[in-house]
Image (cartoon, rainbow, N blue to C red):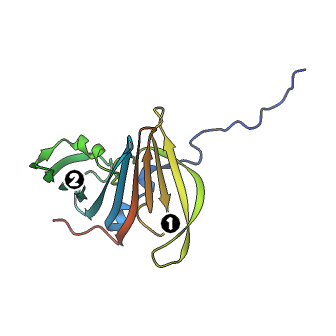
C-alpha cells in the first residue's frame, strides 16, 4: 500500500542551525589569549603553549608566540578583517637547532593550531551543552559546536557566551588529535597598532 501526503522528518537545510566559524571568536573583543596545546599522533604526543596578541589597524595584526617542546617562534600575521585572508606572515625563532627570521607563506597559518583565522568560513552545528567548572570554581554552561569534512577531519569548539575566544578546541582525525585548552585571555578591544 502506498501512502500519500507529505514526508515528515526531512530537514529543509543541513545548515539551518549552522554558525560560521568567524562567529565563534569575538576578535573585536579580545586583546590577548593563551592556550595549552597537546598534539598526539601514532602513540606519541607533544605539548606547547600558544599566546596570541591581537592588534588593531588595517590590515589587522596578530603576534602569535609558540613555545615548548624544542620550539620558540614568534609569528607576525597581518590579515584582512573583512575577508579573514592572511595577507602576510613573518616567522622569527627556532625549532631545535634551526633558526629562522624571514617572511613565510601566508598559507603557513594552516600549520599553526587554531587562531581564529583558520575555519572562519566553515558552518558549525551546535551538538550539545556541557557544564564546566571555571578557574574561580563557578559552574558554567558551554555550547559545543562541531564540523566534520568529507575526509573525517573534525573541529569542535567549546563556547562560553561571555568569553571572546573558545574555552576548548579539539581538532581530530583517526590519526591525530590536537587539544587546545584556554589558559588566559584579556577581554577588550584589540591593542593599539604597533
Q: Quarter of the image holding residue 49?
A: bottom left
Q: Which residue is mark 1?
A: 161
Foreground: 94 or 86? 94
Please report the residue visible at 32 percent of the width from the left and 64 percent of the height from the top: 34
- Measuring from the top left, give residue 54's x and y in whole percent: 27, 63
Q: Is residue 145 left or right of residue 178?
A: right
- Quadrant where the C terminus sits is bottom left
Q: Residue furthest top?
A: 1
The single residue placed furthest to the front in the displayed view is 43
Say which residue appears at 32% left-offset and 49% top-offset. 84
Asked if the residue under mark 2 is in contact with the one under mark 1, i.e. CB atoms within 8 Å, the reply is: no
Residue at numbered disc 2: 77
Tell which circle, 1 or 2, labels the residue nearer the N-terminal end. 2
Q: Residue at x 33, y 54 (%)?
A: 115
Query: Is 143 positioned to the left or the right of 23 in the image?
Result: right
Residue 51 position, x and y percent, is 28, 62
The vertical placement of 139 against 38, above or below, is: below
Helix, strand or loop status at disc 1: loop
Q: Is residue 131 above or below residue 176?
A: below
For residue 25, the mark is: none
**CA separation in Å, label 1 and label 2:** 26 Å
Most extreme residue toward the right is 1
Percent coordinates x, y for residue 153 in the rendering: 45, 39
| Foreground pick, 157 / 191 | 157
* Label 1: how many Cα within 10 Å (few below 14, some 14–19, many 20+): some
Crowd band around label 2 with a 10 angstrom C-alpha radius: few (<14), some (14–19), many (20+): many
Query: How many labels, in total?
Result: 2
**Image: 36 above or below 108:** below
Q: Secondary structure at mark 2?
A: strand
Q: Quadrant of the N terminus?
A: top right
Q: Position of residue 11 (x, y in %)?
A: 67, 38
Amino acid at each position: 500500500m502506498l501512502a500519500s501526503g507529505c514526508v515528515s522528518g526531512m530537514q529543509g537545510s543541513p545548515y539551518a542551525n549552522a554558525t560560521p566559524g568567524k562567529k565563534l571568536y569575538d576578535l573585536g573583543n579580545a586583546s590577548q589569549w593563551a592556550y595549552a596545546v597537546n598534539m598526539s599522533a601514532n602513540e606519541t604526543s607533544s605539548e606547547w603553549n600558544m599566546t596570541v596578541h591581537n592588534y588593531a589597524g588595517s590590515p589587522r595584526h596578530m603576534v602569535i608566540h609558540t613555545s615548548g617542546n624544542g620550539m620558540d617562534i614568534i609569528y607576525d600575521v597581518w590579515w584582512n578583517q573583512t575577508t579573514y585572508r592572511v595577507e602576510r606572515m613573518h616567522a622569527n625563532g627556532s625549532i631545535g637547532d634551526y633558526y629562522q627570521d624571514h617572511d613565510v607563506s601566508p598559507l603557513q597559518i594552516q600549520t599553526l593550531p587554531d587562531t581564529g583565522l583558520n575555519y572562519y568560513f566553515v558552518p558549525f552545528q551546535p551538538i550539545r551543552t556541557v557544564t564546566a567548572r571555571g578557574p574561580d570554581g563557578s559552574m558554567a554552561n558551554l555550547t559545543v559546536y562541531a564540523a566534520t569534512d568529507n575526509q573525517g577531519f573534525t573541529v569542535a569548539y567549546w563556547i562560553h557566551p561571555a568569553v571572546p575566544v573558545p574555552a576548548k578546541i579539539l581538532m581530530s582525525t583517526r590519526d591525530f588529535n590536537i587539544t587546545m585548552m584556554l589558559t588566559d585571555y584579556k577581554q577588550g578591544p584589540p591593542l593599539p597598532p604597533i
